[in-house]
Every structure is written in structure tokens, then in C-alpha cells.
Image: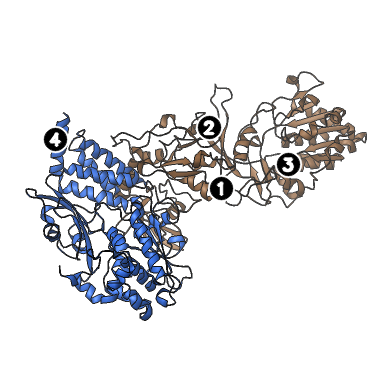
Amino acid sequence: MVKLLIDGRPVETLEGATILKAAQDAGIAIPHFCYHEAFPPEGSCRVCLVEIEGMPKLDLACSTVVREGQKIRTTGDRVLQARRAVLEFLLTEHPLDCPICDKAGECKLQDYCLDAGLTVNAFSEIREKREKKLVIADKLLLDRERCILCSRCVRFLRQVTGTRELGLFERGVGTQIDLYEGQPVANNYSGNLVDICPVGAITDTDFRFKTRPWFLEARPTICPLCSRGCSMWADYHPGFPRVAGSARIYRFRPRLNPEVNGHWICDVGRYGAMALETDRLSELRWVKGPSHAELSWDQTMDMLAAKLRGLKTGGAMDRAAIVLNSRLTSEELFLAKKIFHEDLGAGRIVFADPTDGAADDLLLRADRTPNRQAASRLGFSYQGDLAAALRGASFVWIFGANREALEPVRRLSAALQAVPTKVLSAPQSTGLEPFMDFVLPTASVFEKAGSFANGDGWDQEFLPVHPPCGNARAEEGLLIDLGRALGFDPEFYAALDGPRAVARALRSAHPQFGGGR
Amino acid sequence: MSRDTRLLPVDFETADLRRLAVYEARGGYSAARDALTGKSPAGIMDEVKAASLRGRGGAGFPAGLKWSFIPKGDEKPKYLCVNADEGEPGTFKDKYILGHNPHLLIEGIILACYAVGIHAAYIYIRGEYEMIARRLEEAIAEAAAAGCLGRQAFGTEFALDVFVHRGAGAYVCGEETALLESLEGKRGWPRLKPPFPAVVGLFQCPTVINNVETLANLPVIVRDGAAAFINRGKPKDGGARLFGVSGAVIRPGLYELPVGTKLREIIFSHAGGLRPGRSLQAVIPGGMSSPVLKADEIDVAMDFDSLAAAGSMLGSAGIIVIDDEASLIGVLEKIASFYARESCGQCTPCRLGTSWMAKTVERLAAGEGRPAELDGLARIASNIKGRTLCPLGDAAAMPIQALLSKFRPELEAEIGRAAKGRG
């Protein structure tokens, strides 16, 4: 350990740590643009200059390694003057179009200038004219006037993806970020460029001009689109009181998790997660019954419980087909197992999951479900024969993941239509609704609490980002109600009250759950 | 100047000195041959350290000390990079060595590599020196064919290959780490130090980077000894230098004179003084980035320490003489626009500060500004100085600061006249 003084405060840090890191760990923020924890120091923005007692010049906090007994000042006249000077230089060629810039509110240049009290621009020469909306990727635009040339984007594409689509061209004040031979950024991690850009130079066309960052609340969540289970922030707009539909998630960003995803998320997750919020089922429907508006969840669960009890009494449960999916939480899979396997003894429990895709060597895994690990821990065999399950079934309840996962079911529509009672519960439209007797809208992943066990066995808990849409509810609550209505093992269901009761029951029944973060 | 004070035998008078036979006939390669066949590498290094040979590229770092930073016992290969990217305005000394006496450089390279234990040297030559690069390659081929280079240099076990690499015209590539990047085939952007090139240099290996003229001094140090070398210069700054004199003198050119020769003597005796009727206004003593001297400051001795004491620097010893007819705002504009054009664009203060200065000076020179704006210019320069990633920022700020502080009334008067002229 190395002991030193930063701004008069004793700080202890690891040998080899930089001043910036040591200060950051001690809660002292030093401004920086080009430095990013994921990359080696670049030292080009010069805004992190600090004063080390006894040194003639100011030194870079991002690259200077701490020494025992050092006395460092991150504030004071010399440091603040140098910092203001760097910011003033950056503003000379910066358009200051903050009022129409998507980054305003979370822009580091804006924040640092505000902190430095830089309110007057001393630059009175003519600014360079530069491209303001250069298409650099399918969803990304580059504004070269806003760019401060921190080169984080270039280094990301060199050091993380290795795809090297962006480079630095020209020199001096004409230096600019550009594509090689006009070939756009085309890799599965392009969205990260927006996150690491400290200013509004790289913007996402999905987010551009849609809202302002200060309306958004960053809520932690887990990506459900592959078995990596990356930690993400869902930036949620709680909505304006009189604007319908204004409450929603506007974007997903990576949430640092060294064990799982590090600093990044992939585009499949980032943009795919947005798609989970669209095309939602929001109303309960009973095709043969009265208008759906009059059907309540209680009535529905009572009807379904009565139906299932009847089948069990009639000895027809061995022909009851339950189609699950690995996007259900561990708690939901646990309840499904309890109800359909243990309580009812359903004979045909199979899985219909999104199909595997191509893995990449960074984060994306071939297994495009978040929780297959939990299914196998619970003893489900998720590769059951769907056709065999539906053929001659007395009852079918399909827990739908998405349209694509249910494609094999749709191909068996003849067998499906022959089933006397057909229930679908799904968050999104699946294309199977017309065949169904009951359609139950369920919560999206971002509307429920629970946990996923990722491919490496980490159990990752998450909370709802926002309330369910319309009449949708999470499968967890729905299954508890069903279990209670069925009336088997009443003590078990009576104990399931309170937010974490199911998770506790899961862990006591299956101790292998609950390892992780 | 009598002949024996010539330390660096550039020998402008001898025709075809670039031919091996001519060079050898005048005693060439004897120092290298003697060293490789009879002296130890440590002995050579000690001799060079004792000779107080200071780097001729501009910074004046002691050459022997620089070599000693190469880590001992490292298993990686070591490299010598010869900085022949002579780009400092007012400097044209290496050009003559490279073009007129390339074997002197090659002999110096052999000695340096032998002393440090290097087996591959790269000469990074300024892109504009196209013909010179060809001559240099011819000379290397001739030296290799004669056995001075290659697997067994001078019949010894010492192997050395020398390669020529042409730059592409960026001033910043004369900065040693930008040179390494460029040599590796990358964009010529200076590296963040540490690590220093002596530890992590070319291809991530320990690397010595020396200027052409620095290496060209080695044969004479090895031949005559450190004491003789120091005797001809100064105790802490040995030998002679090639002073390039340009600007408003009668005989502009390259003058080989002992370190410590007075600036006045160089301008008025060697370079023939100013043209009739002109008077001296200012002198830039060591390449364009060195702070300007006023006419009454030229009794300074031309060595690193004396010029530093006088508030300037010897740099590359390129002397630019400015007479009373020259426009100082014009000088300012030349300086500001040069560094703005040559700033590599990597770090903020240099990229944006140099272009800001250039834009302001250009406007002032065009008569579209007020004399008081010189304060703003001084402020920009002081915000660049000491804050940049490589020395280019300082090189841009220092001459502007010096012109502003020493010639403020003259500059204000010129700006006033220019504004009136537009008027």
C-alpha cells in the first residue's frame, strides 16, 4: 500500500495506482475526457492536470503513478487555472449547441465548464466548419463540431472489438474522426460508442431528439437476451402527467459489472431489449366467454384452476401440456415446477425458447435465453418434443417468450386447434392469439422482479424498471394465485406473501440458487 | 578558422566525399575499425560521456548519459534510431552531413551501436530529402559491400544493419516518440511518457534515438579522445557545431565553429554581417522555436547553458537573422501559422491553442484587430506552455511569448499601421 495526501486528505492506495484512480477511490473526482477505465491512459485531453508538490510542472492524474508520501493538489489556483485553460481551448471549436444536443445534461464538457465557472467564451475568431451528421453506423451519427478528439471511440474499436472501423485523419485543428474507405462501423458493440463519448459527438438515432437526459431515471436491470445476462441501466422516463404513453424506457446502457460484462453490452441486447417493450399484449381475453373487459384476473384464475382440478380428478393430467420458456425467472420456473409437476402432475412439460444464434468472442452467447441454467437446476428437460406434447393433449398452457420462440408451435397449429382448452400467457403478441381460448397478458422482463441464473451460474436479481402495461401481470403472482386457487399444499402458498417470499422458498428448496451477484 | 579546430570533418571542399574511397582516403572509418578491432564497448561509452557530447537535435541532452539509460541484461533486441527528420525552420545542418558526407554518419552509427550493443539502426529521414535519401542508401550499400556493415563488420563478430526510412513530411515526426510511431507504420503521434524510448522504444524494445549531427561527432571523439573534444568546445558542452545562418545576412550558410562561439561573431564575421544600410532588429538563435534575442543581446556565447541563461536556447543552432526591414508581425504570423499547421492534433492545448494563435495573428496582420489583443495572444501562449503532451506546444508558445515581451511596442505600432491601412 502507498500512503499519500490528496488535497490534504490522507489516502491509501495500491502500489502502481494512478493519481486519478487513488483520488476517485477516495471520493475525489478529477475531471477527465480521454481517460477511460477500460483503456490504458492516453494523456491527450490534458484536463486532469494536477499539482504534485515539488514538481515544476503540473502532471497528468490519469497516467502518473502514485508515490509514497506524495502531496497532491487537485484544486487550487494553479490546477484550476490549467483546467479552465484546457476547457477554454475545447470551447473554441465547440459549437455550444447544448440546447439541441442529446448529451446536454450528461455531457462531461458541460459539467466541467459549469464547475469551472466558465461562462464567457474568449474565442473571437472564426470557427472551423465541420460535418454535423456523418453516418458512421446503422444507428450512429457523428457530429465533428462537437467532437473533442478524446479518441475513446477509436480506441474502443481497436482495443475492444478489434474491428478498427474508425480512425483519426488529418492533423492540427483539422484532425477528425473518420471511417476507413467509407466502411461504416458494423459490429455488435457499436452502441457503446455513444456511451463512451464524453460529449454529444456520437449520438444514437434511436435516442436522438426523443427526450432529455434529465427526465430519465437510471434503473438497474439485467439483459434477458442471452445467457451472459449483462448488467444494464434502463433509462426510464416516469412520464408527464397529461401526455399519454410518455412513461417508458428510452434506452439501455451498460452497467459496470466486472464478473459478467465489464463496461460493455452488445447491440443485440441494447436494441433487442427495446423491442421487448413493443407489440405488447395488455388485455385479458376469454374467447368463448363474455367481453374481455368484464373478465378479471381472479375470475380467470378461478376458471383455470377449476378446469385443471377437473382434469386432475378425471385422470387427464398426463395429457396436459405445459409449454414453458427460459425467459421466465428462476422464481417463476420454481412455481411452475411446483404447480404443474408436483401439485398437478402434468405429464407433458416442454420448453419453447428463442433459438440459439451465433456467439461472438466478447459478450454475446449462442444461448439467447437468460435462464436455461435455472431450468436445468430445477430438473426441467427443456428440449422436450413439442409435437408429441401437443398431439392429443387434453389441455395446453403456453407460457410464451416471444413470437420467434413460438414459431414451432405455430407450425403445429392443427394439433393445437384440436386441444379442448388452450391458454396463452405472454408479454408480447405471438401470433398464436387467434387459436387460443384464454390470452393472459404478462409483464415484460422490465416490469417484474426476480432472478436469472446466467450461463456461468451467477444468480442475478433484478427489480422492475417500471409498472406493467395495461392489465399485464408477472407470471410469479399469477402462478401464486393459481396455486392457491387449486388448493393443493395450502401451507406452501400461504407462506408466499411479501416481495421476496418466493425467492426464499426457492433457495430453501434448492440451495444451489442464490450464488452470485 | 585554422583547419585543426574542425572537429566535425564535414569538409565541404572535398568533392565526392560521399564516395567510400574518397572518405577512406581522408582517414574515414579508421575510428570505427580501431574501435571494433581493439576497444571495448564500455570504453567507447566512457569516452563519449567524458567528451560532454550534447545532443545536436535541439534539447542538448548528454549523449553518453542517454545511452546509459538502456537497460542492462534485457533480452530484447535494442535499436538505434537516427533522427534525420530535420524540420525545424532555420535548420539545414543534417542535410549537409547526409548528402555530402554520409559515411561520417554511418561511421558514427557503427560506433554508437558498438558501444550500446545494437545490431540494427534505422535512419528516419525527412520526406523532402528525397535525393539525399538515395545518396544515403548508396553510401550504406557501399559501406556494406566494403564490409564496414553487415554480418561481420570490419571482419569482427559485430553485426550491424542500417536501414533508411523516409518520413512523409510531418514536423512532429522529429519528436522522438512520434518518430518511433511513424517508423512503426502508424500515425506520427507522440507517445505518452513514461515509458521512455530507452526502455520501451521501437517495436516495444529499448531504443536509442540520436540526431544525425550528434552521431557524426563520434568518429572524431573516438579518434582524438574526449579531452581534445572538450578543449575545442566547452567543458560541459564539447566540440564544434554546425551553425546554420539564414535571413538578412550577406553570406547565409552553414558554419562549423566551436561550441561557445559568440553569436555576434557568427553573424558579423562569418556570415558577413548585414547588408549596407540595414540594422539588426532581432535574432532567432536556435531554430524557430527558440525565443528571439534583441539586437543588444547577441554577445551571448553559442552553447546550451549560455543561451539558456540568456532566456533562449541553442536548439538546433539554426540562426535566423532579422533586420530592421522585416515585419515583426510577419515573423509572428510565420511562427504561429507554422506550428498551427504542424500540430499533430493529439492534445488539446496544442491542437486548439496553436490554431487560435494563428487565427488571431493572421487577423492582426491583416489589420483587423487592436493592439490590445496581444494580451490575449500572450495568455493563449502561456496556457499552452508546459501543458502539452510533447514539446511541440512549448516550441510554439516560447517564440511567441518572447516576441510579445521583447517587441511589444514595435508589434503594436505595426498592428496600428495595418489597421489604418485598411481603414
Q: Residue at x 68, y 33 (%)?
A: A443
Chain coloured brown in this rendering: A
Q: Amino acid at mark 1?
A: Thr
Residue A220 position within the rendered picture, expressed as x and y whole percent measured from the top left: 58, 41
Q: Secondary structure at mark 1?
A: loop
Q: Please tell me which of labels 2 and 3 falls first in the chain.
A: 2
Q: Secondary structure at mark 2?
A: loop
Q: Nearer the viewer, mark 2 or mark 4?
A: 4
Q: Nearer the viewer, mark 4 or mark 3?
A: 4
Q: Which residue is mark 4?
A: B417
Q: Amino acid at mark 4?
A: Arg
Q: Are marks 2 and 4 on the same chain?
A: no
The numbered mark 4 sits on a residue in which chain? Answer: B
Circle 3 Cα neighbour tier, 10 Å, few/some/many (<14 / 14–19 / ≥20): many
Q: Which residue is mark 1?
A: A161
Hey, which residue is sitting farthest right in the picture? A314
Residue B355 position within the rendered picture, expressed as x and y whole percent measured from the top left: 31, 41
Q: Which residue is mark 2?
A: A205
Residue A12 vs B369, above or below: the answer is: below
Mark 2 and 3 residues: CB-CB less than 8 Å, in contact? Answer: no
Quick check: can you spot residue A173? yes
Residue A326: numbered disc? 3
Mark 1 and 4 residues: CB-CB less than 8 Å, in contact? Answer: no
Q: Amino acid at mark 2?
A: Thr
CA gap between label 2 and label 3 equals 31 Å
Q: Nearer the viewer, mark 1 or mark 2?
A: 1
Quadrant where the N terminus of chain B sits is bottom left
The numbered mark 1 sits on a residue in which chain? Answer: A
Residue B35: numbered disc? none
